[in-house]
């Protein structure tokens, strides 16, 4: 078994999209078509799901999944759906609690506050399949600033021009020089790219 682990960095909006994606796919596996079809869209982005459409889809998918006409699957239907349900509940939990912190509903370390935090999003996430998932908000202070020197970490940078009118960023801490570019903007861009690559 491959026990490699990964860390990904996304914005809150992108995390919310992952939440929708994992919820939808999990509900597909479970045969909860009414909720899975909430994400069906026309070319203008409008929701196209309806009672009739859901019933028509269910008439085909329920027998195919081995579900009775009025039966809906759920957590535990199949491991592949449970794995996505774990991811979904971890994301919705993280987003809900972080929103409560940022809106001042509670402070970090405080227990869940009722009834302000009564929604299911605040419930403990599930760990149905595999080891627990870790999602935490990135601390912008710990990330450093874009223009920090890739060699000494100094935030003191300046720019210079060479004799041909080109620019480069240079560090006032250690004297390192960035790549030469035809504009100051692209000199900064190259300085930042150099940081990421190194
Ligand atoms: Zn430096």
Image (cartoon, helix red, strand yellow):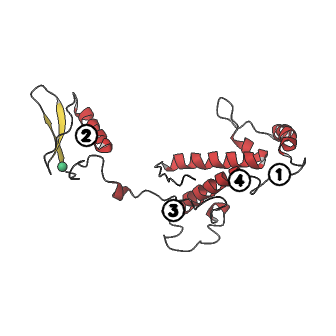
Q: Which residue is mark 3?
A: 103
Quadrant of the image occupied by residue 132 = bottom right
Secondary element at image label 2: helix
Q: Nearer the viewer, residue 49 or 17?
A: 17
- Residue occupying image coordinates x 67% and y 60%: 128
Q: Is residue 42 above or below residue 24?
A: above
Q: Is residue 138 above or below residue 20?
A: below
Q: Earlier in the sequence, mark 4 or mark 1?
A: 1
Q: How many marks?
A: 4
Measured as percent of width and height from the top left, residue 36 is found at 73, 44
Secondary element at image label 3: loop
Q: Which residue is mark 1?
A: 72
Q: Which residue is mark 4?
A: 79
Secondary element at image label 1: loop
* Mark in front: 4 vs 1: 4
- Residue occupying image coordinates x 60% and y 72%: 113
Q: Which residue is mark 2?
A: 191
* Mark in front: 4 vs 2: 4
* Mark in front: 1 vs 3: 1
């Amino acid at each position: 078994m491959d026990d490699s682990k990964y860390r990904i960095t996304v914005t809150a909006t992108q995390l919310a999209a992952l939440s929708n994606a994992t919820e939808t796919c999990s509900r597909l596996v479970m045969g909860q078509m009414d909720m899975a079809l909430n994400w069906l869209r026309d070319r203008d982005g409008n929701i196209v799901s309806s009672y009739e459409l859901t019933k028509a889809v269910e008439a085909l998918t329920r027998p195919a999944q081995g579900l009775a006409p009025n039966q809906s699957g759920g957590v535990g239907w199949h491991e592949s759906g449970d794995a996505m349900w774990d991811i979904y509940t971890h994301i919705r939990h993280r987003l809900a609690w972080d929103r409560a912190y940022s809106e001042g509903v509670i402070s970090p370390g405080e227990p869940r506050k009722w009834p302000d935090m009564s929604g299911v999003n605040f419930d403990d996430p599930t760990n149905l399949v595999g080891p627990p998932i870790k999602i935490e908000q990135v601390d912008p202070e710990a990330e450093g600033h874009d223009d920090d020197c890739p060699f000494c970490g100094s935030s003191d940078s300046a720019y210079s021009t060479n004799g041909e009118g080109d620019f480069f960023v240079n560090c006032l801490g250690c004297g390192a020089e960035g790549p030469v570019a035809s504009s100051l903007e692209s000199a900064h861009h190259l300085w930042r790219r150099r940081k990421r690559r190194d």
